[in-house]
Image (tube, rainbow, N blue to C red):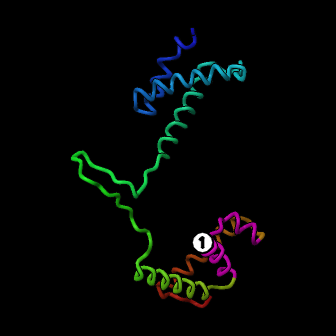
Amino acid sequence: AELMKRYKKPVYHMVLKMVRNVDDAEDLTIEAFSKAFKSLHRFKKDYTFSTWLFRIATNNAIDFIRKKKLRTISIHSSYTDDNGDAVGIDIEDRNLTPQDSAIKDQRIQLMRMFVDKLPSKYQRLVKLRYFQELSYEEIATELDSPLGTIKAQLHRSRELMRELIEGKETNF
C-alpha cells in the first residue's frame, strides 16, 4: 500500500502522456501495479524499485497502444456520419492500370537490356541486388567477397548504368 501511495501519481501521469485518455491511464496504472506485485519475486535488488515499476508501466502502455491500433473494421459494414448519412469506405486500388503495367514492364525490359551491356561481374551484382533484392551482406556471402568490395563494385556498376542510360557509353 505504501508503494502504491508513493508511485501511483507519477506512474499515472507517465501513462497518461502515452495513451492520452484519463480512463485508460487509470486502468493501465492499476494494471501496472498489479503486474508488479505479481512479479515482485522477480525484482532484482540491484535496481531501484521505481525504475522497475516504470518499465512495467511503460511496457504495459505500449502493449495497450499496439492492441488498440490493431482493431479493424469491415469494409462491408455500413457506417454513418454525425448527420446519420450512410458513409462508405474508400480503399485505394493498388493494382496497376493496364497502361501503367505496360509501362512498368517496358522499364524493366529496358533496364535488363542496359544490365546485359555491363561487364559480366557487374551484371551479376546488379541482378543479385536489384532483381533478386539481396542485401549487400547476402551478396558478399553469395560471392565470397568482402562487403567493401561488393559496395564499391555496385557503386561502379551504377555509374556505368548511368553512362549507358545517358548515352555516354564507352567500351567497357
Residue 132 place in picture, x, y as percent: 64, 73
Residue 134 part of the magenta-drawn span: yes
Residue 165 place in picture, x, y as percent: 49, 84
Q: Is residue 166 left or right of residue 54?
A: left
Rendered view: 112 above or below 152: below
Q: How many marks?
A: 1
Query: Residue at image x 40%, y 58%?
Result: 76
Q: Quadrant of the C terminus?
A: bottom right
Identify the main secondary structure in magenta: helix
Determine which residue is flagged by label 1: 155
Q: Residue furthest top?
A: 2
Quadrant in which residue 143 is drawn: bottom right
Q: Is residue 167 left or right of residue 37?
A: left
Residue 36 visible, this orientation? yes
Residue nearest the observer in this picture, 148 or 75: 75
Residue 120 part of the magenta-drawn span: no
Residue 164 visible, this orientation? no
Q: What amino acid is labelled 1 in the image?
A: His
Query: Residue at image x 45%, y 80%?
Result: 101
**Range drawn in magenta:** 121-143
